[in-house]
Structures are given as C-alpha cells and as structure tokens.
Amino acid sequence: MDWNQVFRLPNAALAGDRRIPKTVLVSQAGLTKHEQKVLDKVSSVRHFATVQKSTTRILPCIDDERDIQGIVFLQCDMAGGSEAYAEVAKLLHKCFPNPTVIAFNGSGSVCISVALTRKSLSEKGAVTVDAAEGTGAFRETDQAYGLFLESLAFDSLAQDDLFAFVSEIAWKVRLSRSIPALGFFPECSENNRVLFEGLTAKLDQLEKESSELAQLRKSSDLSMNEKAQIRMKQKGIEKELASVVASVKEICHG
C-alpha cells in the first residue's frame, strides 16, 4: 500500500523511504533478547516522512509537559503473514523519542498505530510514550474504512502545532476502532468526545469478553451444561453490545 496516498504529506516532509536496520533499533532502544525476537515478525522498517516546522511549517509544541519538535512516520512490512501489529507497534514506538505514526503492511491486511510522547516524570531529559492508539487489522479495500483513510490527509488535520496534529491522527484512529461494530466511520463532535470514549471503551471490553467466551466454548473438556451456560453469557453480552452500539450511533454519524 502506498501510504502517502493516504497521508498526502508535503514533498518536503518525505524522507525517501529509507530502510532502518534492525540492529539500529536494537541498539537505539536497548532492546532485550525477548524484544529482539518480536522483530522477527518484521520484514522491514522504513522511515518515510518527518513532519516538523522545517518541512511543513507546523510549529513545535514545547511546554512543561511536552517537547515535540518532529513527528516520525514509519512504514513497517510484516514477515511471514504475521498480523501481530499491536505487539510490534508497542516495541517500535518505544524506539523513538518522537511521536510516531506507523503504517503497517501485512499479507492480507493493513494497520495504523500512533503514539504520543511526553517528558518523563522520573528521568530528566528523557521522554516516554504517553498514549498509543491502533486501528487493528483491516483490509485496505474495505469500503467502511474509506472515509477514515480520507480523514488522515495532511490538509484535513489540525495544524495549530505538532501536538495538535498528531493528537488528531490518534483521535481518528481511536474513532476507527468502532467501525467493525458500527459498519461506518463515525464523526463525533468535540462536545461528545468524553461520552464517545466511555462508550467505545465499553465496546472494546464487551467484544473482548465475547471473543474469550467463544474461544472457551471450543474446549472439548466442557460438559453440555457448561457450554449452555457460556452460550447464555454470550447472549447477554450480545444484548449489551447492541445497546452500546445504539448509544454510539445516537451521538455519531457516518
């Protein structure tokens, strides 16, 4: 996937799709042996753009909490059909002191992950990942994601400063997480953001519980009565899910 067809960044911000050796990532972040094994799920990591004042005229964000003077855009190609996007994203985000936007290419799906950074409270001069959002796996041909991808275009994002810019990308990614349940990319007003976040957190929790119960039901060790009890719990969760989805649709439109 040509990710700059999505982000549409200015030419001055493009880095020439430079490959970053895994050895550099290992040494730069001081990765453990276990973390290095996570990199086996990666075919290549490329630095394809940097959004900063000199390349986009967007001002840095420097205050008591943050020192953001550049946002790094990466492309990560997964190896061997792996879709371990969340695991790899968590590792890659910690390798950079800047906020990072990672665009993943898998064998049959894609994913976007965004991390915001702030100054470390425990170590002077250091930064830490403050928050991260990921879309989860989706197919680039899925029409339900069309408006989401269009919303990530450079000219449509806030440009007050770099923190506002990357925060809006993170918010769009957060919104996209509800697409599988809603069937469309929701638009949510600023006034409803807190309510939306609470509802989608509940949505995430219920979907996780439903998935865990579905997996549990596959166990051959369960009796017919135990499977029936699990099925009843699933029906209860499905009812809750429908109620939460209805509430989300009331405050959003696609």
Image: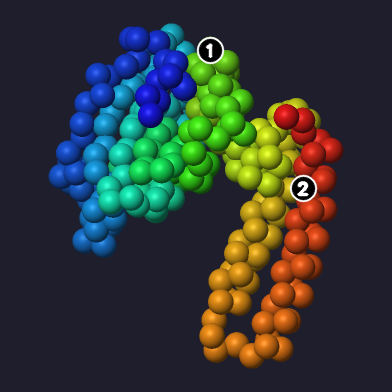
Q: Nearer the viewer, mark 2 or mark 1?
A: 2
| Residue 218 horizontal/vertical position (percent) | 56, 77
- What residue type is disc 2 on? Val
Indicate the quadrant where residue 124 lies. top left
Residue shown at 41% from the left, 43% from the top: 108
Side of 124 relative to 34 (left or right): right
* Dot 1: element: helix
Q: Residues within 10 Å of mark 2 (few under 14, many from 20)?
A: some
- Which sits in the foreground, 46 or 194? 46
User: Is residue 219 shown to the viewer in this render?
Assistant: yes
State the residue at coordinates (58%, 23%): 151
Which sits earlier in the primary sequence, circle 2 or circle 1?
1
Inspect this view and state whether residue 114 appears. Answer: no
The secondary element bearing badge 2 is classed as: helix
Q: Position of residue 19 (x, y in %)?
A: 20, 31
Q: Tell me, for residue 155, which label it has, or none.
A: 1
Q: Which amino acid does the dot numbered 1 rest on?
A: Asp
Name which residue lies at 33% across and 9% down: 12
Q: Are marks 2 and 1 in contact (CB under 8 Å)?
A: no
Instruction: List the residue tagged with mark 2.
Output: 245
For the residues labelled 2 and 1, the Cα–Cα distance comes to 31 Å
Q: Position of residue 39 (x, y in %)?
A: 26, 51
Label disc, if present, on residue 123 of the rendered structure: none
Q: Is residue 23 left or right of residue 92?
A: left
Q: Position of residue 132 (x, y in %)?
A: 49, 43
The front one of 99 and 87 is: 87
User: For this rendering, which residue is in front, 237 or 144?
Assistant: 144
